[in-house]
Amino acid sequence: MTIKEFQEFIRRQYYARDSERGSAGTFLWFVEEVGELASALAGDDQYNKEEEFADVLAWLCTLANINDIDLTEAVRKYTDGNVEGFK
């Protein structure tokens, strides 16, 4: 499955409810999931890490959807070689 396909899947499943919550509320859910990922990374449970990475990606797609951002287009800055240097 591509990023675009996954983002569309998330849109079909959750857009109505997510758009009602809005960006601010959705961002709080996203941050909570990032916190859960941080906790999982500190442990040894590989399955839990995978679950939390999936949750973070799903919530990122949700944020993108309700803000009308196509993540495939957004990542072109990396895939098209438009990023100089590193952080």
Image: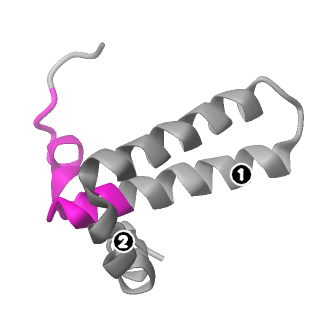
* Residue 19 placement, left or right of 33: left
Pointer 2: what residue? 7
SS at mark 2?
Answer: helix
| Vertical relation: 48 (above or below) 40 | below
Residue 43 location (% of width, % of height): 84, 28
* Real-space CA distance between mark 2 and mark 1, rounded to the nearest whole angstrom: 18 Å
Q: Residue at x 29, y 45 (%)?
A: 24
Compared with 65, 60 (above or below) is above
Q: Amino acid at mark 1?
A: Glu
In the rendered image, which residue does mark 1 sit on?
Answer: 50
Residue segment shown in magenta: 62-83
**Dot 1: element:** helix
Q: Earlier in the sequence, mark 2 or mark 1?
A: 2
The structure residue drawn at horizontal position 61% and vertical position 48%, both measured from the top left corner, is 53
Is residue 65 found inside the magenta-colored segment of the image? yes
Give the class, few, some or many, for how many residues have Cα within 10 Å of label 2's Cα (few <14, many ≥20): many
Give the amino acid at mark 2.
Gln
